Amino acid sequence: SKVTGVSLAHLATELMLGKTLKDLGDIRVSCDNFYGVKEAVFPFNMFPEVDPVLGPEMRATGEVMGMAENFGLAYYKAEEASGFALPTSGNVLISVARRERKYLLPIAKGIAEMGFKIFATEGTSAFLNENGIANTCVKKLLEGRPNIGDMIKNKQLNLIFNTPIGREGKTSDSYIRRMAIQNKIPYMTTIAAANASVQGIRAVRQNADMQPKSLQEYHSK
């Protein structure tokens, strides 16, 4: 309703009271000049043993929203409102399941082009090297020291892309995500979110105008 400027609750009430869609007239809206991105916010920091990978029943729950003239900036604002603002520089950890690596290249290239230093776990690191993307291989938790956990504790990471790898890496990946929350490091558990993050960082680096606007300003255009 906030993005479209149309009270969906009011329309639903009218329908329940007996009106038809035809009675409501033309309720189509156009939001061609701005985007709205809703972000879920959960108190995972209050439940340190809970893995913050969202299931289908949780992904539809939203508590904050970002609005802007382009998708990237709207996504950045949504992440900032959730308490995990995306960094505009620094170090990024990438650890992606083998089945999803084919979608990783544009994301990794985008991060590298913006000057971020990429750290990656062994399999992901080898994939990036094969495709000409510079990175530093980092050990997983059970592979020795220093490892990912040490980097998180030492504040050496600013952003984490970590998709669930499967049963063999479930414990390690879950621990990484929990540590990210405890240390207030933005983390993405899907390729879609990682891609949106790159768009968001690029947008805010290109557009320093982060002044808030009212809903009335957006809907008056």
Image (cartoon, grey):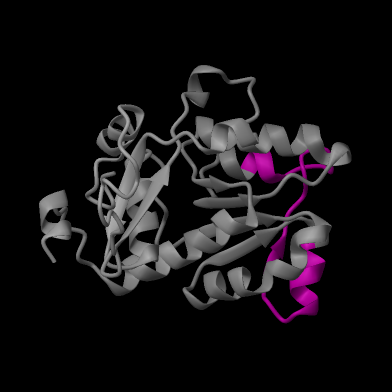
Spot occupied by residue 52 in the image (x, y as percentages of width and height): 60, 32
78, 29: nearer the viewer: 29
Quadrant where the image shows the N terminus: top left
Which sits in the foreground, 40 or 34? 34
Q: Is residue 146 left or right of residue 30?
A: right
Residue 47 in magenta stretch: no
Q: Magenta stretch? A: 124-150
Q: Is residue 40 visible?
A: yes
Above-or-below relation of 50 to 1? above
Q: Nearer the viewer, residue 129 or 28?
A: 28
Residue 156, x across and y down, in percent = 54, 49
Q: Quadrant of the C terminus?
A: bottom left
Residue 8 vs 30, above or below: the answer is above
Which residue occupies 50% across, 61% down? Answer: 196
Instruction: Kindly identify the residue that appears in the image at 76 percent across and 69 percent down.
Output: 102
Provide residue 21's location: percent of width, then percent of height. 34, 46
Query: Which percent across, then down, holds residue 74?
Result: 34, 58
Does residue 54 appear anywhere in the picture?
no
Relative side of 109 to 200, left or right: right
Q: On the picture, is 91 further left or further right than 176?
A: left
